[in-house]
Amino acid sequence: MQINNISNLNNGDIIIFYKTYGCFNITFKSTISKIGLILINPKYIDDKFDKGVYVLEGTHDSDKKINTKITLLNSIINENKDNKIYIRKLYSFQQFPYNILKDTINLLNNNDSDMNIFDWSESLIQTKLRQYNDSINAPLLAYIYIKLGYLNKLTSWALITSQDWTKKDFDLKLNNCNIGILQKIN
């Protein structure tokens, strides 16, 4: 699958994958199948990463521990060939806080973060009740945006859903940035 404007992606942009259902070029249903944070040349996180465009996502292991996963964008696109892909651009009023992002990822992966397990439980319950697909990544992105100084610290990050990141009238309280409209990139 070819992506248009991949060179226009920046650190902190939000990428959203929509799975569509239908036939004969008529879409009956569209659901969010994946949401993540764009990272450009993330050697500042770990030297193992080559130059390129990556996506940061949340995962949980067999012990239900929340971790982050960083994957090349092209690999994710190949795994999600049937999805429509959109970007929500981050327009930051400050230099991107690389060190804060690195520290936040390390905290998440070492499970030393201040992410309260009860907040995650509430998030997963709310997500199940609302039947949104992406129960980990939307609150994870909100948590990261709070740490980066882009979302208000009083935001209830655990209750943020994929739908919150995709609303036409973006209503999360932002700091030091603006978020662009959804732009289709494939």
Image (cartoon, grey):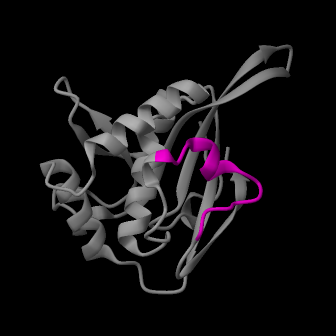
Q: Quadrant of residue 63?
A: top left
Q: Quadrant of residue 99?
A: bottom left
Q: Quadrant of residue 51?
A: bottom left
Majority secondary structure of the magenta segment?
Answer: loop
Please, which residue is most extreme toward the top here? 23
Q: Residue at x 45, y 54 (%)?
A: 157
Q: Is residue 43 visible?
A: no
Q: Is residue 145 magenta?
A: no
Q: Position of residue 5 (x, y in %)?
A: 63, 59
Q: Nearer the viewer, residue 136 or 56?
A: 136
Q: Residue at x 18, y 58 (%)?
A: 107
Q: Which quadrant: the N terminus?
A: top right
Q: Position of residue 57 (x, y in %)?
A: 38, 44
Q: Which quadrant: the C terminus?
A: top right
Q: Is residue 23 above or below residue 120?
A: above
Q: Nearer the viewer, residue 163 or 153?
A: 153
Q: Is residue 21 visible?
A: yes
Q: Position of residue 79 (x, y in %)?
A: 46, 28
Q: Is residue 91 above or below residue 118?
A: below
The answer to whether residue 147 is left or right of residue 109 is: right
Q: Which residues are magenta?
A: 159-173
Q: Nearer the viewer, residue 118 or 86?
A: 118
Q: Position of residue 121 (x, y in %)?
A: 35, 35
Q: Residue at x 59, y 69 (%)?
A: 173
Q: Residue at x 69, y 60 (%)?
A: 170
